[in-house]
Image (tube, grey):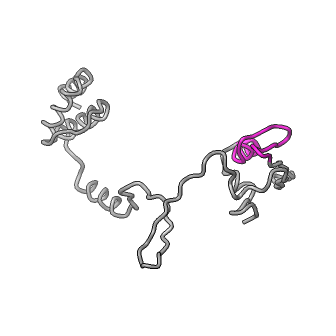
Amino acid sequence: MKPSIANELAGLEHLTVPELRHQYATLFCEPSWVANRAWLVKRIAWRMQALAEGDLSERARCRALELAHDADLRLGPPRPKQDGSVKKNGSVSTAVTVASPRGRRDARLPRPGTLLTRAYKGQTLQVQVLADGFEFEGKFYDSLSAVARAITGSHCNGYWFFQLGRKGGSR
């Protein structure tokens, strides 16, 4: 990198956000709607280096376009699940499902007092379902995932680990 570019890049750290936005507008020929200082510095530094050193090669551009074309890109956030039931008049009513409040029990859990049994690495493990959590080897846990983590030493879904299906039974 040329010394003059290195000095200009170092000088970006001392500019204010309005000065960075002006610099961005000068380099990109469009105004910046972003006021995030770190983002502006990175984009301006990239553009200054690209102009001084040269941009991507044509081969690299083509490969990037191929990758972008093949990728399964999500352009927006996922929509909430909806129940699309059809009314008698032909219109569709949609009810958005909302996460259950913390106090409600998950339908996959068996009743309090039930012992969940799981064979794991040659041992038979038993977890007792309580009204407000779980008991395993004399210790209390808030969730099945916490129990599974204590057993395996790594994170895993507690319902999956104990093979609980949709309504308190097995899959």
Q: Residue drawn 30% across and 33% down?
A: 36
Measuring from the top left, give residue 68's x and y in whole percent: 33, 59
Q: Residue drawn 76% across and 63% down?
A: 169
Measuring from the top left, give residue 30's x and y in whole percent: 14, 42
Name the one closer to the observer, 69 or 90: 90
Q: Is residue 84 above or below residue 27?
A: below
| 143 with respect to 70 (left or right) | right
| 141 with respect to 54 (left or right) | right
Q: Residue drawn 72% across and 41% down?
A: 142
Q: Is residue 13 above or below residue 171?
A: above
Measuring from the top left, give residue 160's x and y in whole percent: 69, 56
Which quadrant of the structure image shows residue 70?
A: bottom left
Q: Is residue 10 magenta?
A: no
Give the quarter of the figure containing the C terminus: bottom right
Q: Is residue 131 magenta?
A: yes
Name the one closer to the observer, 95 or 71: 95
Which quadrant of the structure image shows residue 63?
A: bottom left
- The magenta segment is 130-153
Name the one closer to the observer, 164 or 69: 164
Q: Residue drawn 84% across and 55% down?
A: 117
Measuring from the top left, give residue 58's x and y in whole percent: 22, 55
Name the one closer to the observer, 69 or 53: 69
Give the quarter of the figure containing the N terminus: top left
Q: Is residue 143 above or below residue 94?
A: above
